[in-house]
Structure formats: structure tokens, C-alpha cells
Amino acid sequence: MAALALPPDDEVLLDAGRDQLVVLDPLGFLVGRRLVDGRSAWRLQARGGAGFETRLVARRGERVVVCGVERPGGDVHGPPTAPTLARVELHAVGDAPALDEDGAVEGDTCLADVLRPAPGTRFARHGDALALASRDRVHLLDLAHGLAVRRGLAPFEPFEPRALAFDEAGRLLLVAAVAGDALLLWGLTQGGERGLQVALPAGLGPAIAPPVCGPEGRVYVEDARHLLAFEADGRLAWGRLARGVAGAVVAACGAVVATLDGVVVALDARGNLRELARADEPFVTGPALLDDGRLLVAGARALHAFAPA
């Protein structure tokens, strides 16, 4: 496995089917890098360039969607200004795109480019549905029809989004800050019906990762120091406190695989853990599980691969 430099603040896409990692480089190019050697398989110029911090990169067949928010700006002699725009780009990138002599995809790949005045936007994708959560509103866009708006949802009361995800069934999982800075976890259908509401513990955040849903509807919520498991009816199943939590996924067997305190661990239904992987550097990302059972996780210097446990 090659040593791949990962952007410190931007999200990346592990395209396991093509053995690539898709990243936005410092020059504003979206690049598909081969996992085996780290070299570029293709690249294209993102419309937002390096001025947007990538929050979601996803692939649906030959279509790649890039979602981001403006990076903080402002005059060099004054305080930085807060981001005010969110951007969604949809690009056509085939399995073997035609490249020019510099390795860039030939022609105009952009199918759609949407700008929204929406600071704090959170993004999530499931199938052809792309969800954007901003203040008091969730919009669903259609990747199959050039980012056309499917519908807008207003979940019952004013809120600020903190984290957003889909579960395997296409239900939206939204962590929202409501009146008095209370944090709620909502489960929403794509029609806007709310079937789950959980009051999250005080002290969670400020940065909260997208929720993860496991078998039988159990939902996992994490911030930098906590990993919490909630039953489908909203009851707290267990919680873990750590010096650092960097991400979690749910394996096919139902176990949670997470990066806690720089090592990868598996947690069972009761929250008991066993160590799966460590390296000569602490891991700084959550793990990714490939179809062949391999586990990928990144440190500050390299991307590490481990055989099935």
C-alpha cells in the first residue's frame, strides 16, 4: 500500500471497486489516485477549485458528486470571514476516461453545478438521492437528473444541522441543534415524516460525525471523545468515552469497527471492545472495510491496509 498524503480538512472518497482514492488536491483538481502506488489515474478541474472545503465526495456509476462549503476568507489584516456558500458539482467520469497529455479528463465533465447561500450545510447520499441540510430545511436533490430538486423538508421546528447521514433503507438521520442549544437526533423519511427523536447528552460536540446505522436499527453517534449507541426506539444501549474518536463503521456481522485513541477496535452489542489493528503511528481517520474483508485506515503519514481479522 502506498503512502498517500491526505488533505487535512477535506473529505475523501474510497472508491473500492476501482481501487482508487478520490481527493481534492491543493490546486483545486479532483484526482483519482491508485491505492497500489498513489499515482494519479485521472484528474479534472473542480468548478469550486481550492476555494471550497470538500465535505462529501461520492460516486454513482460514472457520475462523481463533490459537495463543499467555502473556506474561511477575509483580508489578511483582519479577522477571517465565515463561509456563506455551499456548492454541489456533478461530473461525468467513466471507468476509463480519455485523458490529455497532462493526465486530465478531456472535455467538459461538469453535468451540473449548484451554489446555495447556506453556511453550515451538511451533505449525505443514498443511491440517486443527495440530501443537503441547512438552517431549518433539508433539500433532496436527484443525481440521476442533473441535481434537480426532488423535495424540501421542514422538520417541525427551527434547527441548525450538526450532522447528516442516510441509513441503508434511505431514512435520513439528522443531528440538529434546537432552541437552547439542545441536540436532537431525528430519523426522517424522504417524505418528511419523523419516526425517531432522541435527546442527545449535553456536552456532545461541537463537531459531530455523520450517524451510522447498524442491524435492527441501532444508531451510533460520535464526536471527538464519545461513541454512543442508541436502540431503534431511542434508548441508550451503551457509550464509550475516549481521548480521541476518529470514525466508526458497522461491519456485515453487526459489530462496530472504530478508531479509538489511535488504534482500530471492534465493539460488540454490549460495547465490549477488542483491538483489531495498530501501526507505528496513531490512526487519524475512521476505518473503511472493503468487500474482500481488508481494512483501510490512515495515519498522518500513510494509508494502511490490514488483512481480514
Image (cartoon, rainbow, N blue to C red):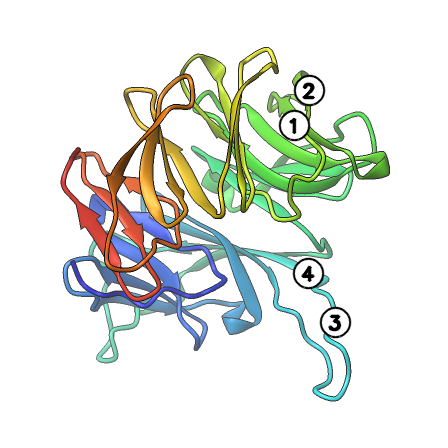
Q: Nearer the viewer, residue 147 or 210?
A: 210
In the image, what residue type sits under mark 2? Gln
Mark with earlier residue (3, 1): 3
Q: Amino acid at mark 3?
A: Thr
Whether pointer 1 and pointer 2 mark residues with C-beta atoms closer than 8 Å, the reply is yes
Which residue matches tag 1? 185
What is the CA distance from the residue labelled 4 to the residue labelled 3? 12 Å
Residue type (three-letter) at the residue carrying disc 1: Leu
**What is the C-alpha distance between the residues marked 3 and 2?**
34 Å
The spot of residue 208 in percent (x, y) is 59, 43
Q: Earlier in the sequence, mark 3 or mark 2?
A: 3
Residue 225 is drawn in which quadrant? Answer: top right
Local secondary structure at mark 2: strand
What whole-number distance in Å separates the C-alpha atoms at marks 4 and 2?
Answer: 29 Å
Residue that carries the numbered disc 4 in the rendered image: 85
Q: Amino acid at mark 4?
A: Leu
Look at mark 3 in the image and give the residue it sits on: 81
Name the front one of labels 4 and 2: 2
Mark pair 4, 1: CA separation: 25 Å
Q: Earlier in the sequence, mark 4 or mark 2?
A: 4
Which one is nearer the viewer's eye here, 206 or 290?
A: 206
Where in the figure is residue 212, as x and y percent of width and height?
47, 31
Circle 4/circle 3 CB separation < 8 Å: no
Q: Are marks 3 and 1 in contact (CB under 8 Å)?
A: no
Q: Residues within 10 Å of mark 4 (few under 14, many from 20)?
A: some
